[in-house]
Image (cartoon, rainbow, N blue to C red):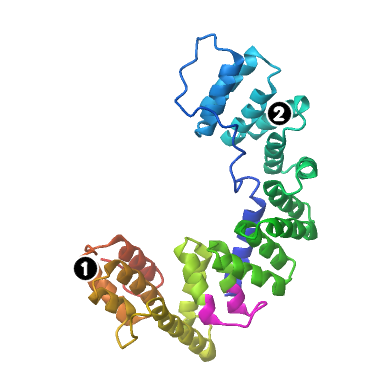
């Protein structure tokens, strides 16, 4: 289990620093303009202002390549049109041409130093190029003018951490959350930096808060905290619950953590009787807790998924059967195999959800491979 957490932590550190490479938010939108389709302009003697408007329209519609063409045409007619140069920088940034974007944005800022949107995008481009001091300088200028500009404060956390300033990164993320507590990416990053600083007692509540808000990677780390008793009382059952939520949102480290724990529960590998018993109990407790999602039902000898299936609730039944089988319920496993072969109303034979589960189970050695 520890090996899984450590490797995932390294991957997510890279993801944290990669916020600059793949920004969490899109570049600032250009001014609102007429959203009607732009008319062709190649070969026409359109004015610079008309070309600027068309470029901004295309950029707002998510067509940065076409926008760049229009904006370059505007600049050929009027090289001093600062708004066109700033918008061209936004388009080039959206296209991933960071060098050209930085060049255009710097040129625009020389003509219009108070264009804060352009300055913020320049900071993103510089961060993506790992030019941390230059990015920090641009962010400081944005925040001097707008101290509560959350995009800038968030990126400042990334830049400060990349510069080795963990305390500064923590401060930046906390200031984002002071303005908007619903910024769960900032909360997750705060928790991650606190964890890297070995401040588990502070990190775990932040992971849990972000996890409760639905942040998938935070759910994985919340599970890891409960599994290891890091800043919270150890509970394998709670860890399993968080890992299932993260896995269902596509976090591969959560799938791996659950797979390793299943191997422990089955007595495989180097785990001893005590560890095996603890894992078995945790999975059983998780299965029992699933009934709480359906307070109108009374737990009995059958699996929850089987009861739902009998009540004519096939979609919910398949979801619960997969969770129960993934938590080592053999009756749920057998029910899924029957559904896969025969189907019922609302669940066709060879249902893709069941197929995906069965392939994963076979890969773990939990069932024979599909024929």
Q: Position of residue 332 (x, y in %)?
A: 31, 78
Q: Quadrant of residue 222?
A: bottom right
Q: Position of residue 308 (x, y in %)?
A: 29, 75
Verify whether residue 232 appears in magenta: yes
Q: Quadrant of the C terminus?
A: bottom left
The magenta segment: 224-239
Is residue 198 something that shows in the picture?
A: yes
Q: Position of residue 304 (x, y in %)?
A: 33, 79
- Decide: is 161 above or below 290: above
- Decide: is 164 above or below 239: above
The residue tagged 2 is 103
- Decide: is 206 above or below 28: below
Mark 2 Cα shell of 10 Å, populated few (<14), some (14-19), many (≥20): few
Pick whichever, 277 or 290, lies toward us: 290
Q: Which mark is residue 341?
A: 1
Q: Determine whether the residue tagged by mark 2 lies in a helix, strand or loop.
A: helix
Relative horizontal placement of residue 87, taking residue 241 as reference (left or right): right
Which of the two labelled residues, at mark 2 and mark 1, occupies the earlier sequence position?
Answer: 2
Mark 1 Cα shell of 10 Å, populated few (<14), some (14-19), many (≥20): few
Q: Determine whether the residue tagged by mark 1 lies in a helix, strand or loop.
A: helix
Pick whichever, 175 or 168, lies toward us: 175
Verify whether residue 317 appears in magenta: no
Residue at 53 percent across and 62 percent down: it is 216
């Amino acid at each position: 289990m520890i090996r899984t957490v450590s490797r995932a932590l390294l991957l997510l550190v890279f993801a944290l620093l990669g916020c600059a490479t793949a920004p969490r938010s899109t570049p600032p939108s250009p001014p609102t303009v007429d959203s009607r389709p732009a008319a062709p302009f190649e070969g026409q003697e359109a004015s610079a202002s008309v070309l600027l408007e068309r470029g901004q329209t295309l950029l707002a519609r998510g067509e940065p390549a076409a926008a760049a063409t229009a904006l370059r045409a505007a600049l050929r007619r009027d090289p001093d049109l600062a708004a066109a140069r700033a918008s061209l920088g936004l388009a080039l940034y959206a296209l991933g041409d960071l060098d050209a974007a930085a060049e255009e944005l710097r040129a625009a800022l020389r003509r219009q130093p108070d264009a804060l949107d352009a300055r913020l995008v320049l900071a993103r481009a510089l961060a993506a190029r790992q030019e941390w001091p230059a990015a920090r300088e641009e962010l400081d200028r944005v925040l001097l003018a707008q101290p509560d500009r959350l995009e800038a404060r968030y990126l400042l956390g990334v830049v400060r951490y990349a510069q080795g300033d963990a305390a500064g990164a923590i401060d930046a993320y906390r200031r984002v959350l002071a303005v908007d507590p619903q910024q769960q990416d900032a909360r997750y990053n705060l928790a991650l930096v606190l964890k890297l600083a070995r401040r588990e007692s502070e990190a775990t509540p932040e992971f849990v808060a972000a996890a409760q808000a639905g942040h998938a990677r935070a759910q994985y780390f919340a599970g890891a905290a409960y599994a290891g008793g890091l800043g919270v009382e150890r509970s394998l059952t709670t860890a399993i619950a968080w890992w299932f939520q993260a896995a269902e949102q596509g976090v591969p480290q959560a799938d791996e953590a659950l797979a390793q724990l299943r191997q422990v529960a089955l007595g495989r590998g180097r785990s001893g009787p005590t560890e095996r018993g603890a894992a078995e109990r945790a999975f059983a407790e998780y299965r029992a807790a699933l009934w709480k999602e359906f307070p109108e039902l009374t737990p009995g000898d059958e699996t929850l998924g089987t009861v739902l299936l009998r009540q004519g609730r096939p979609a919910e039944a398949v979801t619960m059967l997969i969770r129960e089988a993934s938590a080592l319920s053999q009756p749920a496993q057998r029910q899924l195999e029957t559904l896969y072969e025969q189907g019922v109303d609302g669940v066709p034979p060879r249902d893709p959800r069941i197929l995906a589960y069965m392939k994963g189970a076979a890969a773990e050695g939990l069932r024979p491979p599909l024929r």
